[in-house]
Amino acid sequence: MREWRRTGEVPDHPGPPPSGYSLLPWLLLGMGAFSNLLQGEANPWIGGLGVLTFNSLYVYVVFRSFVREKREALSTRLALVLMALVTCALALGYGGSWLSFFPLLGLAVGASTRGPWLGPVGIGLALAAGAAAVYRNGWSDAVNVAYGTLLSTMVTAAILSLAEAVRQLRAAREELARRAVEEERLRFSRDLHDLLGHTLSVIVVKSEAVRRLAERDLDAALAQVMDIEAVGRQALTEIREAVTGYREGSLATELDRARSVLTAAGVEPVIGRSGPPPAPRTAALLGWVVREAVTNVVRHSGAGRCEITVSGTAERARLTVTDDGTGVGGRGAGGPGTGGSGGEGGSGPAHRPLRQPGTWAAIGAGVLAVAAGVTVYRRRRART
């Protein structure tokens, strides 16, 4: 608490929630009636039984008021009615200090009542307190008693409602923070899975190319080895960037890499681009689609030709990847498979559309076709 006062920062855990103990000190308002009992100004048996009954009901109600189910229970409502009857009887029978039980009743009502009934109940209670004061003491105390009763009812309800709202908001904030952490973990695991799956597939394909070329074309084999080294270095850089959350795909880079990977895998690449270049975020998304689709072509399609087409306008970009594969075993570590856009494990296109604006489709038997459409929304500048 001292740290909060010094820094002005609200603590994450301000302490336990309020309870009925916070309303018990207000029972001291009835000390005047207790003094009357000791002085013999009221019947000790009737007055003492009334004070005991009121205090017992007050404690019962206020402790149940901080649990919603108990606060709205029928037993709590019946206890409030009994408190009101006892309060009216004591106030009408003795007056004077006994009228202070009306503000106490207002505290109990404010603590246990929420919603649209609070206003009418509070006003009715204040009018009853004023009428009892007029009947016993005249108009001199009526306004003070009525005002005190209404004020205790409304202020108590407002403070407790605000405290409850703050608790709920803090719980919602903690839940949102927990979900954000889970979503970030899921994003990182998917990105890392995509990155490693694609990179390892490329390394496997190029290693097979080195094995085929080593005996008849040493220079070409060395070129493939240099590509493997470059892919490994790039993968290391991307993994470091993925750990820090700053990895962004590049459509041009992914298209160049796709051409190299497809050529090394013995697949004829046909890459075409038309229209204006997409925005950076759109290009990053489409670059991921190229990466995922080419990985599937190499690993699962058994294709001899793969066509990648990028087209669109300033408002919409479209990427299409098709191949002539038969859906038999691929060339990489994936082994036998069928054509499709399932991607690598749980991080394929079946999962990505839930987080990215686009559409995906796998059509044809044995022929892989992946289509991604992205609509670019631009903010309009406000007119001045």
Image (cartoon, rainbow, N blue to C red):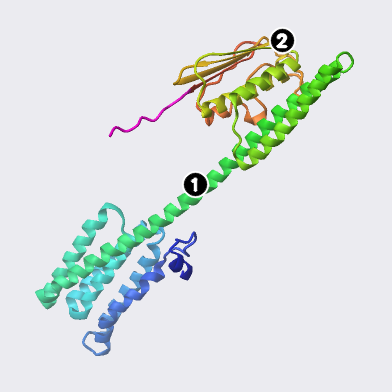
Q: Is residue 37 above or below residue 80?
A: below
Residue 231 painted magenta: no
Q: Tell me the residue that label 1 is attached to.
A: 176
Residue 315 lies, in percent from the top left, at 44, 21
Q: Nearer the viewer, residue 144 or 68?
A: 144
Residue at 37%, 73% (x, y): give it.
Answer: 24
Residue 110 lies, in percent from the top left, at 30, 62
In terms of sequence position, does the residue under pointer 1 or pointer 2 come before the other? Answer: 1
Asked if one can make out residue 212 in the rendered structure from this viewpoint, the answer is no
Circle 2: residue type: Gly
Residue at 60%, 40% (x, y): give it.
Answer: 245
Residue 380 painted magenta: yes
Label 1 to label 2: alpha-carbon separation: 48 Å
Q: Tell me the residue that label 2 is attached to.
A: 304
Q: Nearer the viewer, residue 306 or 15?
A: 306
Q: Nearer the viewer, mark 1 or mark 2?
A: 2
Could you classify mark 2 by the number of other residues whose Cα lies within 10 Å: few (under 14), some (14-19), or many (20 or more)? some
